[in-house]
Image (tube, helix red, strand yellow):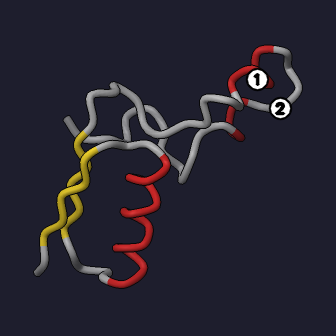
Amino acid sequence: MTRYLILGNGAAGATAAETIRAHDARGEITLVSAEPYGMYSRPGLAYVIIDEIPERQVIACGCRKGEYGQ
């Protein structure tokens, strides 16, 4: 089994993880980030604040609270 280490959970990190998973279903992916939350669209937050879009639309790839490891 191949092990992957991704630094950062921004757009590049999330894309890297998705691309790796698409090509290697068994590989172990570890994503390291200083952020306490999963990836979300920072520009999209303004639209959530003014109730133009629902919160779920700014959270990427199903990364919800509690789905990230320690």
Quadrant in the rendering for residue 21? bottom left
Percent position of residue 17, x then y? 37, 62
Is the C-beta separation of discs 1 and 2 under 8 Å?
yes
Residue drawn at x 59%, y 39% as measured from the top left: 59
Direction from residue 46 to residue 12 in the image, left or right:
left
- Depth check, front residue: 68 or 15: 15
Quadrant containing the N terminus in the rendered view: bottom left
| Numbered disc 2: secondary structure | loop
* Picture coordinates of residue 32, whole percent (x, y): 22, 42
In the rendered image, which quarter contains the C terminus?
top left
User: Could you give the CA–CA distance between mark 1 and mark 2, rounded to whole angstroms?
Assistant: 5 Å
* Whole-percent x, y for residue 39 in the image: 48, 40
Q: Residue at x 13, y 69 (%)?
A: 3
Type of residue at label 2? Ile
Residue beneath disc 2: 53
Count neighbours of disc 2 (C-alpha within 10 A) and say few if under 14, some if 14 to 19, many if 20 or more: some
- Looking at marks 1 and 2 on the same chain, the residue that comes earlier in the sequence is marked by 1
Which residue carries the number 1 mark? 48
